[in-house]
């Protein structure tokens, strides 16, 4: 039986708990705290207009939100980084249905604050089926109301595993985007959103397809 994306993500969570229990516990504590603080209360939601923005591609070209919408309905995915197994797995699941998304006129764009070309390795792994943009100062993530700060205690736990935010993001702020998925009509209206302080859950690819199918053709 084929597992859903969130079933696969639950298995990743289980393996982290098995292999790095201290990180799993810190993740649970942070997710509980972010949920308690309702950090996504100000996030863009269904019915909102897409904020205007301009971001560089991985090869340095500047792309605007207007240009992206001109291609058709937009599937906009904010992710923490290549280092996050939950993010990489969810992007791979979306890339796997990219042909179906394209057949419905859709275009997938992933946004992260990662610098120094880290997104390129993920783009290559996904066979360039997703366009990647670099939100180097996290200004667009802030526009969408998605920022939270990773506590120093979790940063210290991740460092021995090669996850050093200061090197990955080019600054030591510790801020990350709450992972989110937005389906945006050609007119720039958000028709479906998925925003959850629990980064271990994501919008299922089938929900993306269903939202695009509901748009007028």
Image (cartoon, rainbow, N blue to C red):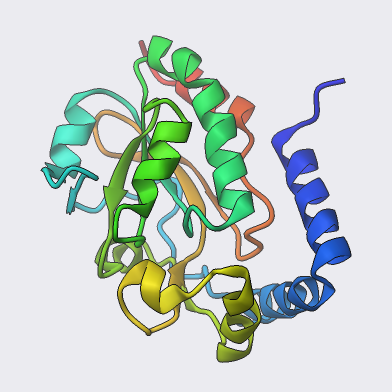
Q: Is residue 138 above or below residue 99?
A: below
Relative to the observer, which residue lies in front, 109 or 82? 82
Residue 183 in sight from this viewpoint: no
Of the 4 image quadrants, the one containing the C terminus is: top left
Relative to the observer, which residue lies in front, 44 or 66? 66
Q: Residue farthest to the bottom?
A: 152
Residue found at x 50% / y 63%:
178
Residue found at x 14% / y 42%:
63
Residue 68 in sight from this viewpoint: yes
Of the 4 image quadrants, the one containing the N terminus is: top right
Residue found at x 26% / y 64%:
136
Q: Is residue 142 above or below residue 129?
A: below
Give the percent coordinates (x, y) of residue 147: 43, 72
The number of numbered badges drawn on the structure is 0
Please identify the quarter of the rendering in which residue 116 is found: bottom left
Judge from the rendering whether residue 145 lies leftward or rightward of residue 156; answer left or right: left
Give the percent coordinates (x, y) of residue 50: 28, 48
Give the percent coordinates (x, y) of residue 139: 26, 67
Give the percent coordinates (x, y) of residue 186: 26, 28
Please identify the quarter of the rendering in which residue 5 is found: top right
Please identify the quarter of the rendering in which residue 188 is found: top left
Residue found at x 53% / y 80%:
150
Relative to the observer, which residue lies in front, 84 or 214? 84
Q: Is residue 187 above or below residue 133?
A: above
């Amino acid at each position: 039986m084929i597992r859903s994306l969130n079933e696969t993500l639950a298995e990743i969570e289980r393996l982290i708990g098995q292999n790095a229990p201290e990180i799993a516990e810190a993740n649970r504590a942070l997710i509980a705290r972010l949920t308690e603080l309702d950090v996504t209360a100000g996030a863009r939601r269904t019915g909102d207009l897409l904020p205007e923005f301009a971001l560089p591609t991985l090869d340095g070209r500047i792309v605007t939100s207007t240009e992206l919408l001109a291609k058709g309905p937009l599937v906009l995915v904010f992710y923490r980084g290549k280092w996050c197994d939950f993010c990489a797995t969810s992007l791979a699941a979306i890339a796997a249905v990219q042909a179906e998304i394209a057949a419905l006129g859709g275009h997938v764009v992933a946004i992260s604050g990662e610098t120094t070309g880290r997104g390129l390795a993920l783009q290559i792994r996904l066979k360039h089926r997703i366009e990647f943009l670099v939100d180097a100062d996290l200004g667009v993530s802030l526009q969408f109301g998605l920022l939270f700060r990773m506590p120093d205690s979790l940063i210290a736990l991740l460092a021995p595993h090669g996850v050093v935010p200061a090197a990955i993001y080019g600054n030591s702020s510790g801020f990350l985007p709450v992972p989110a998925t937005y389906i945006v009509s050609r007119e720039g209206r958000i028709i479906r959103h998925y925003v959850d302080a629990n980064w271990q859950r994501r919008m299922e690819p089938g929900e993306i397809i269903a939202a695009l199918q509901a748009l007028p053709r």
